[in-house]
Image: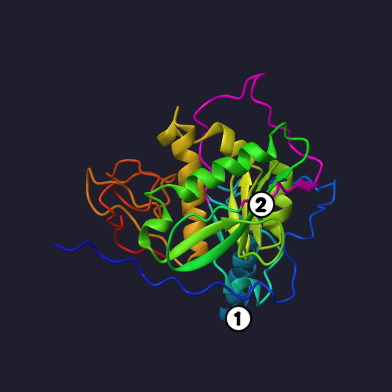
Amino acid sequence: MEPPRPPSAPPPPDVRVPGAGPDARDVPAVFDEQLERSLGAGRRRRAGAIALGVLAALLVAAAIAGIGAFVFQGGTMGGAASSAQVRKTAASPSADETKARIEAEPSAPASITPSTETYIPKRGTGKFTRPKGSNKTFGSGGRLMRYMVEVEGGLRQDPADFAREVDRILAHPRGWTASKRVSFRRVDSAPYDFVVRLASPGTTDKLCAAYGLDTEGKVNCAGGKEVVVNLRRWLLLTPYYKGKPGDYHALTINHEVGHRLGYGHATCPGKGRPAPVMQQQIFGLKGCVANPWPYDRKGRFITGPSVP
C-alpha cells in the first residue's frame, strides 16, 4: 500500500512584512519571576439562613454558588497547575500572531538530575549571538526556507556548535528535505523564514509570553517565526530519550519546524510502529517506539491519526 502523503504545507508569510522579529535581539535583562506562582489558599464561606420563601432560598443558593466559584479559582480546589500542562498567560497574541501555529511542549520530569557539570542558569544576559550564515543549501527541491540560529549569552554554550547541531538535523536524509518539497539554508540577516533560539529558562518564559504561553521555566515553545529552545530541556532531555541527546535534539527541531511548515499534531498509528515526529512524544509514546525523524529509511512519511 502506498504510504500516506504529507499534507501540503502552506507557504510561510512574506518575511519582508514589517513586524517584530529576531532582529530585535535584546531581551530585557530583568524579568518578573512567576515560575512558582501559587494560586493561594481560599476559604469556603458557608451561607446559613432560614428560608422564608422561594425567593430567599434562591438568593442564598446563588450566593453559595458564587462563593464556591470564587474559592475554586482562588486555589482551594484548583491548586497548582499540572506539570503536564502549559498554562496560558494573561497576555494574548495579536491577530497576526494567531495566524501562525503556536506550540509548546508540555513539561515532563527530566531524565537526569542536574549536576555541577550541567550548567543551567535561570537567566542569561538577554542578548543573543547569531553565528555567521552558511552558503550550504540542504535539500534539492521545493521552497527554500531561510533560517537563522541564535544563542543567548551567559549559557556557556557555543553559538557555532548549536548552529551546527541545527544544521545537522535539517540536513539529515530522514529530515524534512526527504519530501523534496522544501530545502533549507542558514542565513544571518533578513530575509528569513524562521529563527531557532537557544535561551535560558527565564528568557524562554519572556519570549514565549509574547505568544500567550507560560512555559514555567521548563519547556520549549514556537510562535510566529520563532522557535525557542529552552536550555533546561535541551540539556536534560526527557525520559523517552534518556542517554540519546542527538535524537532528542532532532525531535525538538523537527517537531517545531514541522509546525512552521504547516503540519499539525498526529498520534501513534499502531503498537510497535515508530512514533510520528509530529506526535507530542513527551506526553507518552502510546504504544509506538521513539522516533525523531519525519521519514523512515525508505523515504516514507511517518504519520498517524490527526489530533487537535
Let me know if residue 126 is in the magenta part. yes
Instruction: Kindly tell me whether residue 72 is visible in this rendering.
Output: no
Q: Position of residue 303 (x, y in %)?
A: 31, 58
The magenta stretch spans which residues?
A: 105-134
The amino acid sitting under disc 1 is Leu
Q: Nearer the viewer, residue 306 or 10?
A: 10
The amino acid sitting under disc 2 is Gly
Q: Position of residue 68 (x, y in %)?
A: 61, 60
Q: Is residue 88 left or right of residue 22?
A: left
Q: Residue at x 68, y 31 (%)?
A: 120
Callout 1: 10 Å neighbours few (<14), some, many (20+)?
few
Distance, label 2 to label 1, CA atoms, is 73 Å
Prevailing secondary structure of the magenta residues: loop
Q: Residue at x 51, y 57 (%)?
A: 257
Residue at the extreme front: 135
Q: Nearer the viewer, residue 215 or 42?
A: 215
Q: Residue at x 55, y 64 (%)?
A: 145
Q: Position of residue 143 (x, y in %)?
A: 49, 69
Q: Residue at x 55, y 72 (%)?
A: 12
For the residue labelled by badge 1, is the local secondary structure a helix, a strand or a loop? helix
Residue marked by disc 1: 55
Classify residue 22 by image quadrant. bottom right
Q: Nearer the viewer, mark 2 or mark 1?
A: 2
Question: Does label 2 or label 1 sit earlier along the sequence?
Answer: 1
Q: Are marks 2 and 1 in contact (CB under 8 Å)?
A: no
Q: Is residue 117 left or right of residue 256?
A: right
Residue marked by disc 2: 133
Figure quadrant of the N terminus: bottom left
Instruction: Kindly tell me whether residue 282 is visible in this rendering.
Output: yes
Classify residue 244 by image quadrant. top left
